[in-house]
Image: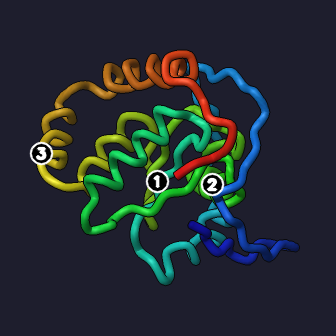
Amino acid sequence: MALQLPPLPGRAMRFNSSVCSLPARKSSTFATLSQPRSDWVEATNSFFDQDKRPIMLFDGVCNLCNGGVKFVRDNDRNKTIRYEPLQSETGKILLRRSGRAPDDISSVVLVEKERSYIKSEAVLKIMEYIDLPFPQLAILLQFVPLFIRDFVYDNVANNRYLIFGRSESCEI
């Protein structure tokens, strides 16, 4: 899958997400957040000009994350979600759009035209897009307080390489 990058100052390119490299990195409990800049939002609006579907950003070398993408694809018969590794150039640009550091691979991110979701909110929003019974399950899980959902999310995310391992290259 390749997404056309929007024209940014001094840059025009096309990126193929099937290739990426990343340095060994230990994830932390706290995500790096920065204030979203309107110029990044405006610069990436072209991602939604031709295709209005949200984009799921995921850790492309994480076996758990790749399994999650495959699960979502299998349960998304209407193909309502697009996918992009966090490590890709497109992923880094969309992270900036979402108000996150471009090297922050600590969370799945769902980017819609008007809004982005992280951690457990991203998971619940993704569940709303896929086939039954997941939208109903997402409604039930919204009654669990955010701090509890994100606590569980962070504990799994921080141990994902240890428990599930990692691949040598980005997959989807």
Q: Amino acid at mark 3?
A: Gln
Q: Nearer the viewer, residue 119 or 18?
A: 18
Residue 129's image quarter?
Answer: bottom left
Mark 1 residue crowding within 10 angstroms, few (<14) / some (14–19) / many (20+): many
Residue 149 placement (x, y as % from top left): 32, 25
Mark 2 residue crowding within 10 angstroms, few (<14) / some (14–19) / many (20+): many
Q: Please, is residue 94 above or below residue 169 in the view?
A: below
Which of marks 1 and 3 precedes in the sequence?
A: 1
Per the image, the residue denoted by label 3 is 136
Residue 100 placement (x, y as % from top left): 62, 44
Q: Alpha-carbon distance for marks 3 and 1?
A: 20 Å
Q: Nearer the viewer, residue 87 or 19?
A: 19
* Residue at image coords 17%, 49%: 135
Per the image, the residue denoted by label 2 is 91
* Residue at image coords 33%, 50%: 72
Q: Please, is residue 132 above or below residue 38 in the view?
A: above
Residue at the right extreme of this rendering:
10
Q: Please, is residue 47 above or below residue 137 in the view?
A: below
Callout 3 secondary element: helix
Per the image, the residue denoted by label 1 is 56
Q: Amino acid at mark 2?
A: Gly
